[in-house]
Amino acid sequence: MKFGIVTYPGSNCDHDAYHVVKHVLGCDATFLWHKDRDLQDVDCIILPGGFSYGDYLRCGAIARFSPITEEVARFAQHGGYVLGICNGFQVLTEAGLLPGVLRTNSQLKFICEDASLVVANGHTPWTVLCPETVVAPIAHHGGCYYADEETLGRLEGERQVVFRYAQRDGTETDEANPNGSLNNIAGITNARGNVLGMMPHPERNAESELGDASGAWIFRSIIHSFLEGTRA
């Protein structure tokens, strides 16, 4: 399986994602420059964390218009796997590939800490191998997920909410929600399931030296789904 990791001006987690898929999990990987349109025959695209285009105007708003994002949208429309992490999640919502928006955190502060997540839907290509809970660090100022009532109802009804902030035992509480996201939402998919956006950083907890390495199960799940021929 071949991964493509997008690099926008201001991306700072692209090499982290590359390291995990290439050196930890042993997959082929390449970088995709923001001005390019050649996806280099990749099977999964990662939009990494960072501050694309300086996060000017609104997080992800400028990256939405880059040539590579237009190609990512076409790739996703044809069923290609796309993972947006943190700033990548923000880009996906700005580009219309995922519903809702990411607002400024409820306490108006940048948050950097480990987050416990409960897997709300273990039957997606991204979670088929995941345990019931995973740990992934967060590092964001605008990670509060918001959608209107109709959209939120659809996400819940169609089981597109994949990760929620929770206690270590999987219990969802207000105290476990670090940024005020509606329904404790930490990650969602599109209706087809091939596009995942999440604010926490699984690539920062994918090796035992960094913690419990449970973030790696998200990447292992998509690799498994691809090799098994599971298309969304």
Image (cartoon, rainbow, N blue to C red):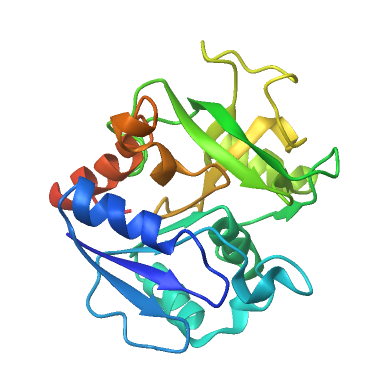
Asked if 206 appears above or below 62 in the picture, the reply is: above
Q: Position of residue 3 (x, y in %)?
A: 27, 63
Foreground residue, 18 or 43? 18
Residue name at image x 14 percent, y 50 percent: 227
Quarter of the picture containing the N terminus is bottom left
Asked if 87 appears above or below 161 in the picture, the reply is: below
Residue 147 in view here: yes
Residue name at image x 57 percent, y 63 percent: 92
Foreground residue, 59 or 210? 210
Residue 231 in view here: no
Asked if 41 appears above or below 12 in the picture, the reply is: below
Q: Position of residue 147 (x, y in %)?
A: 74, 48
**Figure quadrant of residue 109:** top right
Q: Position of residue 155 (x, y in %)?
A: 61, 42
Q: Position of residue 119 (x, y in %)?
A: 46, 27
Q: What is the number of callouts on the image?
A: 0
**Figure quadrant of residue 59:** bottom right
Residue name at image x 36 percent, y 36 percent: 127
Foreground residue, 50 or 96? 50
Horizontal placement of 73 versus 143: left or right?
left
Foreground residue, 96 or 217? 217
Horizontal placement of 212 versus 187: left or right?
left
Residue name at image x 79 percent, y 48 percent: 148
